Image (cartoon, rainbow, N blue to C red):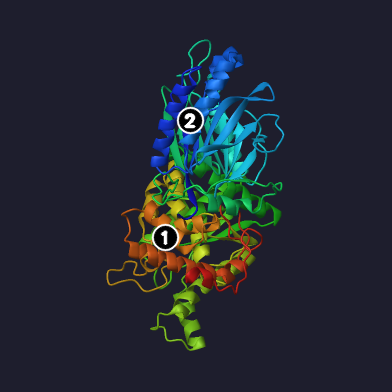
Amino acid sequence: MFSINRIAAVSPELRSADPFFNCQSMISAYHEAVGQGAGIVIFPAMAVTGKSCAVLLKQPYLLESAAAAAGNFAAVTGTAPAVFGMPKVIDGRMHEVIAVAQSGRIAAYVVKNAADHAPFFAPGKVFDAGVRFSVNFAGDMPVNSPAHIHLFCGAEAEVPGMWRDNRDFYRSLSKQWNCAVAASFAGSGESTGDQLYGGALLICSQGKVVAARPSPARGSGIVYADIDRERIGAAMLDREMPCVEPLKLDTACEVDDLRYFDNPAHPFLPDDPSEFEDFCRETFALQTIGLGERFLRCGAKRLVIGISGGLDSTLALVAMAMVCREYLLPMDTILAVTMPGFGTTGRTKSNAVKLAELLGAEVREILIGKSCLQHFEDIGHDPEKTDSVYENSQARERTQILMDLANAVNGIVVGTGDLSEIALGWSTFNGDQMAMYSINSAIPKSNIACLLEYAAGILPGSAEILRDVIDTPVSPELLPLDANGEIAQKTEVILGAYELHDYYLWHFTHGVSAPEKLLALAKHAFAGKYPDKELLRVRDLFIRRFFTQQFKRTAGPDGIQAGVVSLSARGAWMMPSDINGNLWRR
């Protein structure tokens, strides 16, 4: 369902030179994997006889027994291909081969140095069972091909550091080719003579390890992963690949339960919390270098920013402080301007000013209420009518102030809009949508709390302020306060949770755009957290706004790509401003 296939990587219990035992072990593992919904099952190299039987591979009796046992195994296979290693006599010589079995027979063999003709194919041969996969020997450098999944069968003697090297290699390969990679290695049951076989199992997808059994490991093992071939296929469209004719097999099954699908609720963040610190450090470093170099190259003297006490402006202000520290600029290079309007609260203004002063920025306060009321009078707008004119005039007044101040002090206006707002067009055209350089433009809203928490640990005295900013409801503060003087205009009440929008955005920009699939994946990722009705509402709102607000992205400012997604209309996300998007809204 939804172009998702389950892979099982198996390291079965093996005995050296005992092919019937080994194949019975493989049959049990194959049935278990298929029972769990696997559409492809991969076994180690030389799994039929074991790699360690060495000189016995010259014995015709063993080779004949291996062929018979492999036939027994192939006979039980269904439409899920089984990929396994074995010895085979070809033209009077013994070869180490990888067999591809399906629907009761061995459909093909992959042989080192073989001519590429049926039933013998060279390593890297692509097979098409609905999902395209290539078959390779572990240790060989694979060939570039249009495969969704590259399978590697191995049987290597274990030494310290081998697991790490294999993991890093296959993960890097899956990232480089935007594909999935699965590898299976022979285990310790083979032999414990002079060498040990580690039994490693690994499945990677587009740069992530999604299932693994590290080596050395005891006994048999099996790992599963659900691979989205639609997402991989979308990523492969921009990759140059040779023209390869896959060998057609019967169509393997797809899955719909997603139990082994790598589907984090916050895909823009690292899966492993231990990686958060490096992730935040690298994000700030990209912001720092991007803004620092732009500042120097345009010959500016000041960095101008509007501060509100919200997540976005706080993140931008922190990054600007890091620019000053990295480039040895005085902290008052930063001109931080607070511009209270009709919806500004004491809490947000106080946090904005306190943080700017703590960092050593120059702080100015400019009230915009009087200017906006004059503007309402000039254009004949009733100030009691709190509509888009009421809201957008404040955003444009603030932008005008910042631009004019930048002219006055020979500065550049640093934009604060984040990736989530850019995706949804949640900004005022020619207001907060505009800046001279935008450093948050590739950072989703749901990442900012993590980044500010990191900053709280490295900026002395900032922790209390930053954590209060994190706890403050997200709001543009353009509507009057409620009866208690608190924020009345809460963005996530209107739009829905930003973590949902960011989830839909990540998948949409990674090739998953079918509305039904977006919803199904969200139900899986946020199981029980949101009602299905809310997941549907937010999905539809995301799709509608993503298309209708493209005109704001087309006219957006430069901004450093400090994240994995950019919506810049200058190359990363080129799309007509007048596109209707009706296909996605049916």
Q: Which residue is mark 1?
A: 519
In this view, the mark in front (1 or 2) = 2
Occupied quadrant, residue 88: top right
Q: Which residue is mark 2?
A: 72
Q: Kindly identify the amino acid type of the residue bearing the numbered disc 1.
A: Leu
429 shown above or below 360: below
Q: Position of residue 209 (x, y in %)?
A: 50, 38
Compared across the picture, whether 241 is left or right of 151 comes to right
Q: Position of residue 406 (x, y in %)?
A: 61, 64
Q: Nearer the viewer, residue 401 or 100?
A: 100
Q: Is residue 466 above or below residue 50?
A: below
Q: Is residue 446 left or right of residue 429?
A: left
Q: Residues within 10 Å of mark 1 (few under 14, many from 20)?
A: some
Front-most of residues 335 and 384: 384
In the rendered image, the vertical position of residue 469 relative to residue 407, given as above or below: above
User: Image quadrant of residue 31?
Assistant: top left
Q: Secondary structure at mark 1?
A: helix
Position of the N terminus by quadrant: bottom left
Amino acid type at image mark 2: Asn
Q: Is 388 positioned to the left or the right of 400 in the image?
A: left
